[in-house]
Image (cartoon, rainbow, N blue to C red):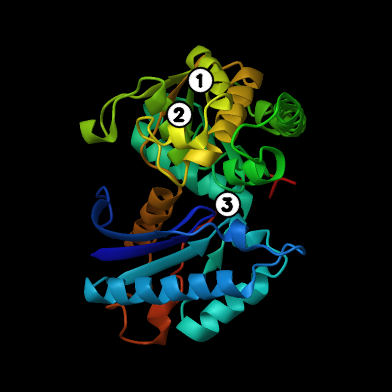
Amino acid sequence: MRLGVLDIGSNTVHLLLVDAHPGARPVPFASHKRPLSLVAYLDGKGRINEEGQQELISFVREAWDFAGLHRAEDMLAFCTSAIREAANGSEVLARVKQETGVLLDELTGPQEAAMTLVAVRRWYGWGAGTILDLDIGGGSFEMAIGHDEQPDAAVSVPLGAGRLTRDWLPGELPSARSMREAGDYIRTTLEEAIPQIDGAGRPDLTVGTSKTFRSLARITGAAPSAAGPYVRRELRRRDLYLWTHRLAAMPVEDRVNLPGVSVIRAPQLLAGAMVAHTAMELFKVEVMQICPWALREGLILKRFDHLLFDSDVPVGPVGTGPVDRALRPVVLSQPAGGPAR
């Protein structure tokens, strides 16, 4: 079947269409996305302004039409920290539903971490042992650890690369004071959160997911995306340390010329590098693997699991009725002990 996955993130809004069936790997069929940093549309009260809402609604309509044009049979639609943490997030979701008919499911931080670990576990298998996954988004940083598919512990902290850049590292070249204050904030935030992960034991494998980790691995020497998803890619802490200092002295316009760095990610790359390096240092990780699958793939895989075991889940061509615009049932498990705070 053909499944549409509509991802409203902090940096981009993205519709991915995949072809798959229960037990098979999802194969990308088509993609439609737009750079849209919703945090750039926050007003002084932390609310997404009218322009930002209009941009979001416009894209959701485009995505719905794109899915119908390409005969998607089912649709998952979700949003993460950009809307979750906006002061008027619930109002925005209600407006999107009213004006487009599409229900965006608001994922919690621990749910994001849990679904990403599902994807990582499926990619590496149970032979990898206990896995620690680190994922840097635009608004938040997720950490999850587990010896099975569901995490034994999952934590989300407000250390997204876009958020940190906006709040702590403004301007082309941050000052030494800005770097020091941002670094202190990152370390303090992680030191408070990491004990929740450490309590689940030591990992056999540490993995980085998300575009930020892929970009950091690429500039430190990992294979380009053109080499395919099955090439082993690593990120070494010593290389990241050197590149963090290089990025701090590099104008954004020069970062765009680095391999694997997009225009929208270039301003945030320094903040992402600082979070990644501090996390690797505190977890005592010298080298991590880079996984090509992340949150979207985790949700897709769980959706197909649900289809396999629940024959009552309705499936029909997108556009055949109002129910087709709502998020289908997906098992979004919380880690043991409930959401992290």
* Three-letter amino acid code of the residue under disc 1: Trp
Q: Which mark is residue 26?
A: none
Q: Between marks 3 and 2, how big is the CA–CA gap?
A: 25 Å
* Mark 1 or 3, closer to the camera: 1
**Label 2, label 1: how far apart the Cα atoms are:** 9 Å
Left or right position of 135 against 317? right
Residue 38 in which image quadrant: bottom right
Residue bearing mark 2: 216
Q: Which residue is mark 1?
A: 243
Q: Is residue 153 left or right of residue 98?
A: right
Residue depicted at 66% across the width and 76% down the height? 91
Q: Earlier in the sequence, mark 1 or mark 3?
A: 3
Mark 1 and mark 2 in contact (Cβ < 8 Å)?
yes
Q: Quadrant of residue 151?
A: top right
Q: Which of 314 and 275 lies nearest the eye of the viewer?
A: 275
Q: Position of residue 337 (x, y in %)?
A: 70, 45
Three-letter amino acid code at disc 2? Answer: Leu
Mark 2 or mark 1: whose residue is earlier in sequence: 2
Q: Position of residue 203 (x, y in %)?
A: 54, 23
Query: What percent of the width, then of the height, locates residue 276?
Result: 57, 28
